[in-house]
Amino acid sequence: LGSGDGRSGVGYELYAVVNHLGTMSAGHYVSSIRTRVDGKWHVFNDNVLTETSEKDLVNDTAYILWYVRKDMASVNIDDVYPRSAANTPGGMTEEEVERFMKRRDSGRCALS
């Protein structure tokens, strides 16, 4: 990507993986996520939770890989999608949505 595309210098970090175990017609899905608190990887296999490493997750059974932009990794979801708007009867007005989107997008990735 060129330097004028608004994305130069932005990197991504793997934070979750969904693995599919089985065949194309049948199988089982197992989810794994790296926690923000300690950076450790945890596998959620039905009701069983185990700790693992990234190298054990990204293999030929990896079905979906989830990434977060490094500059957004510490952003709280409530800062992007405030709960107060979701709990307001009727939701946000068009003007409130427009102001929110401008505030959220200012200083972020710009396309030219």
Image (cartoon, rainbow, N blue to C red):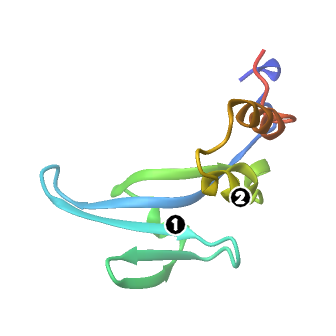
The image quarter in which residue 21 lies: bottom left
Mark 2 / mark 1, whichever is N-terminal: 1
44 over 9 or under it: above or below: below
Residue drawn at x 33%, y 58% as measured from the top left: 61
**Side (left or right) of 78 relative to 49:** right
62 over 108 or under it: above or below: below
Distance from Cα at disc 2 to Cα at disc 1: 31 Å
94 over 57 or under it: above or below: above
- Percent across and percent down for residue 63 are 36, 52
> Considering depth in this image, is 17 or 107 the residue closer to the camera?
107
Mark on residue 78?
Answer: 2
Q: Residues within 10 Å of mark 1 (few under 14, many from 20)?
A: few
The residue pinned by badge 1 equals 55
Mark on residue 96?
Answer: none
Q: Quadrant of the N terminus?
A: top right
Q: Residues within 10 Å of mark 2 (few under 14, many from 20)?
A: few
- Percent across and percent down for residue 98 are 74, 30
Looking at the rendered structure, the kind of residue marked 2 is Asp
Q: Quadrant of the C terminus?
A: top right
Residue drawn at x 53%, y 52% as measured from the top left: 66
Q: Residue furthest left?
A: 25
**Side (left or right) of 44 relative to 38:** left
